[in-house]
Amino acid sequence: MGEVISLNNDFAGLPTKYRYDGWLRFPEGKYQAVCETWVTYQYMSSKRLALIFNILDAGKYNGKHVPMFFGVKRHKGNTREKGGFIASPRGDLMELFYRLNPDSPIVRPDRVPLSKLDGVYQITVSDVIKNRKQKKHPQQLIYSKVTEVELI
């Protein structure tokens, strides 16, 4: 009959703040996923946002979280899960939002409705093997991130 897989959406594996040790490593490739939430954080002096995708493919990686990272202009309020932000008007986050929502009207950069990213997407996952100084990570610190998102 097959393997029964639990599809509960708990946030047990989701860090509330961005941490290098909080992300998992997955085999590189394409997966079906949903955008579950986003997290605002600050890295060094950069204001950042991570979209958190939940993998839907059956098997060992079902229900696991993988991030996609973006720079934002500013944060509104404290950094947290589903935190407020002001996106760059012509930045990568706005480009991704309009590509995944082609019928969306023009939105203000301080009111980007990320909650409307509620479809099932095909994501491409690849490894982060270098740090910010372009030196190779030790094997234990390599993690995966989403590099491409496509509508299905």
Image (tube, rainbow, N blue to C red):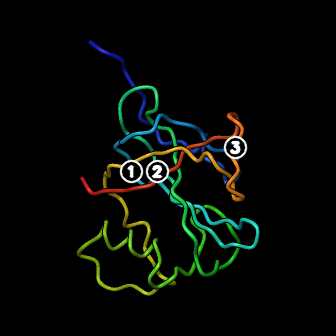
Q: Residue 7 at x, y = what percent?
A: 41, 35
In this rendering, would 136 be left or right of 27? right
Check disc 1 and report its element: helix, strand or loop. Answer: strand
Residue at (53, 42) in percent of width and height: 10
Quadrant of the image for the N terminus? Answer: top left
Q: Which mark is residue 34?
A: 1
Kindly report the distance in space between the C-alpha atoms of the residues bearing marks 2 and 3.
23 Å
**Amino acid on which disc 3 is placed:** His
Secondary structure of the residue carrying numbered label 3: loop
The residue at the far right in this view is 44
- The structure residue drawn at horizontal position 38% and vertical position 49%, both measured from the top left corner, is 123
- Which residue is painted at 29% across and 83% down in the image? 105
For the residues labelled 2 and 1, say whether their Cβ atoms are less than 8 Å apart.
Answer: yes
Residue holding disc 2? 53
Q: Give the residue at x 40% y 26%.
A: 59
Please say if the residues under marks 1 and 3 sit with CB atoms less than 8 Å apart: no
